[in-house]
Amino acid sequence: MALLPILKYPDPRLATKAAVVTEFDDKLKQLAAGVGLAATQVDRHIRLIVIDITEEKNDLKVLVNPELVESSEETKPWEEGCLSLPGIYDKVTRPAKVKVKAQDLEGNFFELECDGLLAVCVQHEMDHLEGTVFVDHLSMLKKQRIRHKIRKMRLEEERAAKEEA
Ligand code: GNR
Ligand code: NI
């Protein structure tokens, strides 16, 4: 999903619930070529996520139509960020381990047991498919502060752009 413009919060299109994939064609394979993103973020509202948590970026996981099979009672807080909310980071508490069922690019089903950062990422990306971003897990007060900060950052960016012109 490289080289496609990323939707930025609070773009209403980020709140779209993604559709089930039925055609496992070349178009789907093209869209999956990239790292750590839900199709929602590039304005493709289908249930496709890609994840690569390795530093070498050599272990790309493509999950089509992912579904949560199990999640642990045990929870864990993690400092999350999102390409759709640049500059915003906050702690989100989620199940520490999850088991996910998904299809690959050929339509074959597989299961993935996730913990640590992988568990965080899978849940973060699956949220995008439901039209949810990580700040939706925070308190109303925190969310308001974040919206305020985003507005301020945007105004500052516009001011800087004008100064350059
Ligand atoms: O870039 C990202 N970093 C990140 C950090 C902690 C937890 C989750 C993530 S995912 C995110 C990429 C993104 O926005 N995916 O939707
Ligand atoms: Ni994200």
Image: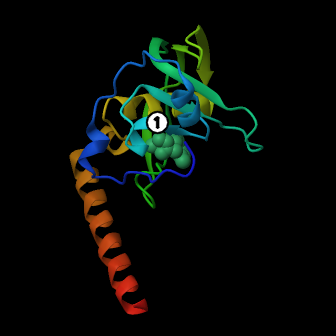
| Label 1 neighbour load within 10 Å: few <14, some 14-19, many 20+ | many
Viewer-proximal residue among 56 and 62: 62
Viewer-proximal residue among 146 and 21: 21
Q: Residue at the spot x=50%, y=30% of the render? A: 49
Residue 146 x %, y %? 31, 58
Residue 120 x %, y %? 52, 32
Q: Amino acid at mark 1?
A: Ala
Task: Specify the quadrant of the image occupied by residue 119.
Answer: top right
Q: How many marks?
A: 1
Q: Secondary structure at mark 1?
A: strand
Q: Is mark 1 within 8 Å of ligand 1?
A: yes
Quadrant where the N terminus lies? top right
Task: Specify the quadrant of the image occupied by residue 116.
Answer: top right
Determine whether 152 is above or below 62 in the image: below
Q: Residue at the spot x=38%, y=92% of the render? A: 163
Task: Specify the quadrant of the image occupied by residue 118.
Answer: top right
Residue 83 x %, y %? 47, 51
Residue annotated with mark 1: 38
Determine whether 13 is above or below 128 in the image: below
Residue 77 x %, y %? 48, 36
Looking at the image, can residue 73 be seen?
A: no
Please tell me in which quarter of the rendered image ligand 2 is found: top left
- Horizontally, residue 8 falls left or right of residue 81, namely left
Viewer-proximal residue among 114 and 76: 114
Q: How is the image coloured?
A: rainbow
Looking at the image, can residue 30 be seen?
A: yes
